[in-house]
Image: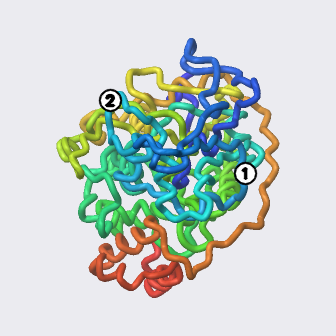
Amino acid sequence: MTILSAVEHIVVVMFENRSLDHMLGGLYSSGTAPSSVLPSGSASSFDGLRTGLSNPANAAYFTGGSSPLVPVAMSMASSTAPDPDPEETFSNVTYQLYGPQGAAPNPTWPMQGFLANYVATGAQDATQIMQCHSPAQVPILSGLARNYAVSDAWFASVPSQTWPNRAFAHAGTSNGHVDNGSPPDPLLWDVPTVFNVLESVGASWGIYSDAMIAPSLTRTVFPKLWDPLLDSHFHNFTAFVDACASDALPSYSFIEPSFLLQPNDAHPPHDVNASEAFLHAIWSAISSSPGWAETLLIITFDEHGGCYDHVLPPGGAAPPDRASQPGDSGFMFDRFGVRVPTVVVSPYIAPGTVFRSNSAAPYDHTSILATLRDWLGISPVAMLPSARIAAAPTLAQLLTLSAPRTELPVLTAPTARFAATPLSAPPNDLQRSLVSGAARRYGLDPATALTQIQSRQHAVDFFKRRASRAL
């Protein structure tokens, strides 16, 4: 059985800013083990949380000073932690991974800078960065991970923030950029996307957003998606539910959560219960669809967002293009970002599967693009030219069953009560980037537009004034 013969629809939902340990590190704890691992012969245990993992409480540790070690916690004190939002830019992530030494082949303090970096945010309780969710605290994500497949070696594409990592998921490159930008400007991200490729080869596609007011983030970032002739590919989430019900999904669907108003994107400190409820709605729509047996769902996160993980990201990443050799800050794009939760759901997947790469390169977000390429038989000439995509492993190894499973796991709907983030709060980097990017698309100056955005309410008002351009 291969992915080519079993699947008619691929659906991807990408949440925000959580690491693997932070969300699913306790998935197979207390002596439990996955039922199967892929590829065959790889480690039989899940590489999650274990006793003894810790971070120094402050930066004095790195200069020989007194600093107690703070152990990782196996559950979260709050569904809105960590609060405030951890740092996620390239320089901050470098510190989280290597401490003050910076990137090094054999680092002295690997993965020991998370807590010291978070202290600098002024958090009232910085130790919350060492807290990780128990399976009971994320029952939908952990339930799907246990009943289908989860990777313990899927890495963000860039050791940095949102725009670069989402760009690799859509375009196989960030055009040499390691941060969103100051200000984030789509004209610096004007590269072809997989959606342009799908359009050129006649494959159906759709982007579905749960945003109540803001435009699609994907469309905002990439000017090559601004063409009004592509409007029919952009929809709200209700249209996705309807398409599932009538077995009318396109070949490729990409789902965006709400990033601004009533956010359910999991971006700290947004309530994780809201992202769980959104994931449950996606699962319910897909699993009840007449096309369920032919649908492959990929659940992932763009990057770790400063949340703790214990695995040092590997080097050896393929720089995607000339713009990345080097790119911003002299980065050669030869290292991956931190592990992120990635769960793959299909009735052709054996329950309790844990998967890693079956090739020389690990899984990263370009594996989605490599999978689409092979599944649709897109020729090298028509496909995006990224060397990272060319090196990426696909998901074909996951569909090991000869017939689709008929049973569905029973996943209890999460609470419908979510802690609200006050609209008076300052916007996070992603929300600012939505304003900045949309301003450029609307013919405004991004930097000038951002001077008007001091709160989330200001961002909401910015989009309300342009409600007719919401796609």
Q: Residue at x 69, y 40 (%)?
A: 144
Relative to 451, is 191 on the left or the right?
left
Relative to 389, is 8 on the left or the right?
right
Tag on residue 284? 1
For the residue pair 294 and 277, the one nearer the viewer reads as 277
Q: Mark 1: which secondary structure?
A: helix
**Quadrant containing the N terminus in the rendered view:** top right
Task: List x then y, in percent, for residue 381.
Answer: 24, 36
**Residues at marks 1 and 2, CA–CA distance in whole angstroms:** 45 Å
**Disc 2: CA contacts within 10 A as few (<14), some (14-19) or many (>=20):** few
For the residue pair 258 and 202, the one nearer the viewer reads as 258
Task: List x then y, in percent, for residue 134.
Answer: 73, 44
Tag on residue 105? 2
Q: Is residue 255 visible?
A: yes
Q: Residue furthest top?
A: 41
The kind of residue tagged 1 is Ser
Residue 181, picture quadrant: bottom left
Relative to 238, is 368 on the left or the right?
left
Q: Say whether marks 1 and 2 touch (CB < 8 Å).
A: no
